[in-house]
Image: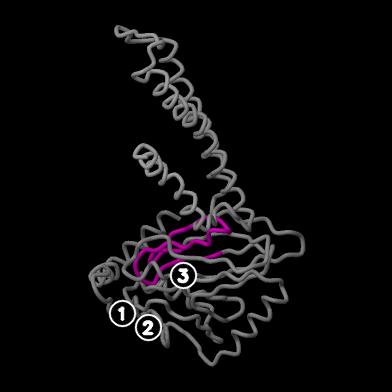
């Protein structure tokens, strides 16, 4: 009875593990866009290439433990054995070949999925542009062509390439919609471009993937992918909002740190708001509301003081 109980408790973690993993969303393995599908393919290919080494090692570990167990007197006993050129060659050659394949695949895929490379649109489909500003701890989405903006909610039509222009009004952050593909950093005084496309309608969660303070874990938003008619209806809904936003009016209040900020719409937004936010770090007029707790109050002030240097670095990089 004691032996059976011991076996049960040893096997218990392996029985519980599938239940724990079943709670994972596995968003990267359920892509809804062309970029996400390519990333999934790269992950799966890399995984199985590595399994060429991992699986035999695991199998041989159990086989060796079983064959050379203490009670198996039939196993050949060779206490003076020390080296085998054949085994040594296999142990080094196979992993080196796998690493070489992984290097080539990763290199090619990384260049083909360059986040700043525009996505080819289908005939008759016009690409669209959305400005993204990371704030503490929320996301501001500006639609320069429509003259509107939203907080913690972004919408765009299905099968339409979207150019996300990404910056930060505060500390560095990272923008990602896992089911659509790549993540990209948002940095104050800099403009980064990310191209994505969604091939299915739906509501996809997006988030910050870079630690930026106590509230970053709730820095979430929804990406609503709709038909062209649905997107136009969404734009009209935003235009019904009585709120307006500009760098001189409303932005400082919005930029103040807040956690779990509700979805908010602005019906009137100047197209140059995004550029104003970037330029504010170049000319030293960046909005730096007081930060609470240990998160970045000093860091934000320091960032503002060095904003010109950051901007100059961005220009040199470009």
Q: CA distance from mark 1 to mark 3?
A: 21 Å
**Residue underneath mark 2:** 252
Q: Total of numbered circles in the picture?
A: 3
First in residue order: circle 3 vs circle 2: 3
**Against 53, is 238 above or below?**
below
Q: Secondary structure at mark 2?
A: helix
**Residue underneath mark 1:** 289
Q: Residue furthest right?
A: 124
Q: Secondary structure at mark 1?
A: loop
Which image quarter: residue 295?
A: bottom left
Which label lies toward us, 1 or 3? 3
Contact (CB < 8 A) between labels 1 and 2? yes
First in residue order: circle 1 vs circle 3: 3
Task: Residue 101: give x, y in percent of width and height.
Answer: 53, 31
Q: CA distance from mark 3 to mark 2?
A: 21 Å
Which label lies toward us, 3 or 2? 3
Q: CA distance from mark 1 to mark 2?
A: 7 Å
Q: Residue furthest front?
A: 1
Residue 85: say if magenta: no
Task: Residue 52: give x, y in percent of width and height.
Answer: 52, 29
Q: In the image, what residue occupies the spot 53% across and 85% down?
A: 266
**Against 220, is 180 above or below?**
above
Q: Which residues are magenta?
A: 164-191
**Residue underneath mark 3:** 220
Tell me if 145 is positioned left or right of 286 in this view. right
């Amino acid at each position: 009875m004691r032996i059976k109980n011991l076996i049960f408790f040893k096997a218990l973690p392996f029985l519980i593990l599938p239940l724990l993993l079943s709670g994972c969303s596995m968003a990267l393995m359920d892509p809804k866009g062309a970029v996400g599908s390519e990333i999934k393919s790269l992950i799966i290919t890399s995984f199985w290439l590595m399994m060429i080494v991992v699986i035999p090692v695991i199998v041989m570990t159990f086989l060796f433990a079983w064959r050379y167990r203490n009670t198996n007197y039939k196993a050949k006993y060779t206490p003076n054995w020390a080296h085998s050129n054949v085994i040594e060659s296999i142990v080094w050659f196979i992993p080196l070949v796998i690493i070489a394949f992984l290097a080539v695949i990763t290199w090619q895929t990384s260049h083909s999925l360059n986040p700043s490379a525009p996505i080819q649109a289908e005939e008759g489909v016009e690409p669209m542009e959305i400005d993204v500003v990371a704030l503490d701890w929320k996301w501001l989405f500006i639609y320069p062509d429509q003259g509107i903006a939203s907080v913690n909610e972004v919408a765009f039509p299905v099968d339409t390439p979207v150019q996300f222009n990404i910056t930060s009004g505060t500390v560095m952050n990272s923008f990602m919609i896992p089911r659509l593909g790549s993540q990209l950093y948002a940095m104050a005084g800099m403009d980064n471009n990310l191209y994505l496309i969604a091939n299915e309608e739906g509501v996809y969660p997006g988030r910050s993937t870079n630690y930026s303070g106590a509230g970053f874990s709730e820095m979430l938003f929804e990406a609503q992918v709709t038909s062209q008619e649905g997107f136009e209806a969404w734009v009209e809904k935003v235009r019904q909002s009585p709120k307006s936003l500009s760098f001189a009016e409303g932005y400082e209040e919005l930029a103040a740190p807040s956690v779990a900020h509700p979805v908010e719409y602005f019906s009137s937004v100047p197209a140059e708001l995004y550029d104003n936010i970037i330029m504010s770090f170049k000319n030293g007029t960046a909005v730096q509301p007081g930060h609470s707790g240990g998160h970045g109050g000093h860091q934000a002030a320091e960032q503002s003081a060095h904003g010109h240097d950051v901007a100059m670095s961005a220009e040199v990089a470009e």
